[in-house]
Amino acid sequence: MAKDPVRVLVTGAAGQIGYALVPLIARGAMLGPDQPVILHMLDIVPAAESLNGVKMELVDAAFPLLKGVLATTDVVEACTGVNIAVMVGGFPRKEGMERKDVMSKNVSIYKSQASALEKHAATNCKVLVVANPANTNALILKEFAPSIPEKNITCLTRLDHNRALGQISERLNIHVSNLRNAIIWGNHSSTQYPDVSHATVTTQDGEKPVHELVADEGWLRGDFITTVQQRGAAIIKARKFSSALSAASSACDHIRDWVLGTPQGTWVSMGVYSDGSYDVPAGLIYSFPVTCVNGEWCIVQGLQIDEFSRKKLDATAEELTEEKALAYSCLA
Ligand code: NDP
């Protein structure tokens, strides 16, 4: 029997990531090849015409799984009945703007969208925040949508996770599908800590630790980390636009693994509400290694954290604590 359609909200849907993301959702890359979807696309009034153009293209693509498309500038209409919300829209940092000005704009956007989701989304709606500062936008959303369980509000660090896997696969000249269990700790910013000290490679002789195969701690603690941290800037330099294809693809990976589950023995990175695991302050949205079963994520416990990693985990937590304080000062 055909499944009931799932309603998926994409905010900022007329933007670059939105444009790359909606066809992936309509093709089943996010929720599976047998799951019909209804897309709710939200953007701001100046982008309304462009948003309508995206809707026209979705109609023209005749996606079999796409059972309806709503394109709107009305936040209440956009949020009504949605089961999944992917928050891509946000105010970009423009030349001459202070960090506090950008934060202030985004805090007010996420506060109002939180209220609309809280009142109008379907029960148990799952939320993924992509727009930067992603972790702190997610925290604000959590604060202003208190009836949405905190476990349902997450932010995207899967692109950074996938970038880490990509760098190791290039270095070892192996296919990325033979590689698993990288970790992104902390903030989706340049203080994030890409960590492959627990990652492994499937070889003909069984699972081997990445650090054993790479056999170059200097690279793993140096250039590998900075390359992943600065990959977004490298793409802007090469393409003259920020990453959109890979951001959209990793947003699909995030929701797919959350809803459909992570493969046995594999974890992924998600920005989630900290419960104090690994001595990360509780009450931040922080990226951890997680496994997902039956639509619920769970932080992987018991990993050894050496002194080098401890410093990195603390530094990115410190930045998030400062961002949180800045966001609250904007609210006041
Ligand atoms: P993009 O679609 O390129 O990016 C959207 C957001 O995702 C930005 O905040 C961007 O952050 C963030 N992002 C997170 N991870 C990545 C990544 N790896 N690579 C690139 N971006 C990443 O931006 P556009 O300007 O093309 O589109 C934004 C849309 O949002 C527009 O359609 C606009 O109309 C809408 N918008 C909505 C607002 C609202 O809801 N009130 C306010 C302003 C705009 P970063 O900026 O750091 O690259």
Image (cartoon, rainbow, N blue to C red):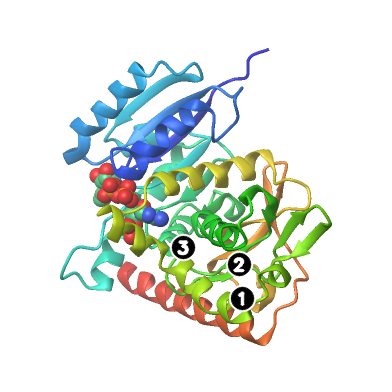
Residue 201 found in image quarter = bottom right
Task: Name the N-terminal-most of marks 2 and 3.
Answer: 3
Label 2 environment density (alpha carbons within 10 Å; few <14, some 14–19, many ≥20): many
Disc number placed over residue 280 in the picture, else none: 1
- The local secondary structure at tag 3 comes to helix
Q: Are marks 2 and 3 in contact (CB under 8 Å)?
A: no
Residue 274: where, in percent of width, then height? 61, 67
Q: Could you say which is closer to the camera, residue 275 or residue 97?
A: 97
Residue 234: where, in percent of width, then height? 35, 63
Quadrant of the snapshot with the C terminus: bottom left
Residue 292: where, in percent of width, then height? 70, 49
Task: Using residue 89 as the reference point, say whether residue 93 is left or right of it.
Answer: left
Task: Using residue 175 as the reference point, say whether residue 67 is left or right of it.
Answer: left
| Disc 3 from disc 1: Cα separation | 14 Å
Furthest toward the top, the residue is: 1
Would residue 111 be seen by someone viewing this image from the given angle?
no
Q: Looking at the picture, which amino acid does disc 2 mark?
A: Ser
Q: Which residue is mark 3?
A: 135
Residue appearing at x 49%, y 75% in the figure: 223
Q: Looking at the picture, which amino acid does disc 1 mark?
A: Val
- The local secondary structure at tag 2 comes to loop
Q: Which residue is mark 2?
A: 274
